[in-house]
Amino acid sequence: MTVPLWAWAAVLGVILAMLAIDLAAHRKTSVVGVREALAWSGVWVVLGLAFGAVVWWVWGAEFAGQYFAGYVIEKSLAVDNVFVFAIIFGYFAVPREYQHRILFYGVIGALVFRAVFIAAGSVLIAGFAWILYVFGAFLVLTGIRMAFHRDETVDYGKNPVLRVFRRLVPTTDDDHGGRFLVRQAGRWVATPLLAVLVLIEVTDVVFAVDSIPAIFAVTQEPFLVFTSNAFAVLGLRAMYFLLADVMHRFVYLKLGLAMVLVWVGVKMLLLDVWKIPTALSLGVVGAILAAAVAASLIRTRTAVPRKENR
């Protein structure tokens, strides 16, 4: 797959333009309601699918299939991020009107870190082909661990990164109207929101350790790995506000995500034995997720709905 520099520049331009539009649309501090989140989710999904159509038109069906497979895998794994973000916001009692701002900068950081991981992964694969088997084994073990530890709770107040941050950076206990830094007594101090942003960034880096190898299981093309990641991550904020009030109903989704990781890990381990077609891989991922969501909704059909912010 030959990708000219102008194509990379065009993709980055689209991403920056969409981030600017999103920032302008939410420049005022306000609560993002379900309807608005649904509308923005539709925008991000249409954008991701449209780019897949461009890949199909320019590079053909096989590469388009690889892009869509990577996009679906990353989009599904992003749901796990949403669960954790909700726990973090709840743990630190972050007002809902400030959550979009934190997630906005969190997404920018996620795009940067993932670009670095993708570049590093591409270099490793180019120089050491056997690293794919390491990735595959890692995904299988991660999926198994996720399946057996999906109900674990985490005390984020004892997170080592957060403890180091608080030790090194002077902080205040007040949100100060959603700002990350304020000047007090002649020095800059961090608000609790900056500490939460740091924790969100670190959490996404941990998730990227799983999701990046998972996408390398369906394509080793850096352009497709990055774009499928980027267009999936761009919709993370809208997905959070769309699912925040109903996440308690997806009781089997984490198990489904664990099965997805195991599947893509096995696919990677079988590269020299049987190269599983991209369409089949995408179909299996879709079937696993559909079954997990359906089983969850059936299991929780009598659950009491939570209050929604509209």
Image: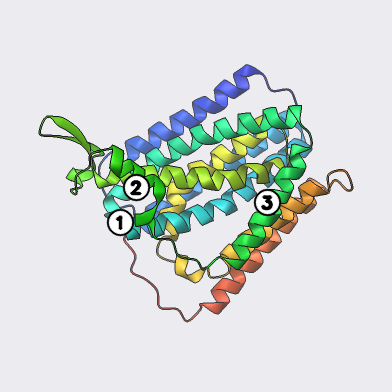
Where residue 157 is drawn, which disc sits there? none
Q: Decide: few, some or many residues near mark 2? Use Cα within 10 Å; few <14, some 14-19, many ≥20.
A: some
Q: Decide: few, some or many residues near mark 1? Use Cα within 10 Å; few <14, some 14-19, many ≥20.
A: some
Where is residue 8 drawn, in percent x and y?
60, 23
Residue type, mark 1 in image: Phe
Q: Quadrant of the N terminus?
A: top right
Q: Is residue 122 left or right of residue 79?
A: right
Residue type, mark 2 in image: Arg
Between the C-alphas of marks 3 and 1, the distance is 31 Å
Q: Which residue is mark 1?
A: 92
- Of label 2 and label 1, which has the lower sequence position? 1
Residue type, mark 3 in image: Leu
Where residue 139 is drawn, which disc sits there? 3
**Depicted 176 relative to depicted 283: above or below:** above
Q: Quadrant of residue 17?
A: top left
Q: Is residue 89 left or right of residue 10?
A: left
Instruction: For the residues labelled 3 and 1, say whether their Cβ atoms are less than 8 Å apart.
Output: no
Where is residue 123 drawn, in percent x and y?
68, 27
Residue shown at the point (29%, 44%) measured from the top left: 166
For the residue pair 251 and 27, the one nearer the viewer reads as: 251
Residue shown at the point (50%, 49%) measured from the top left: 42
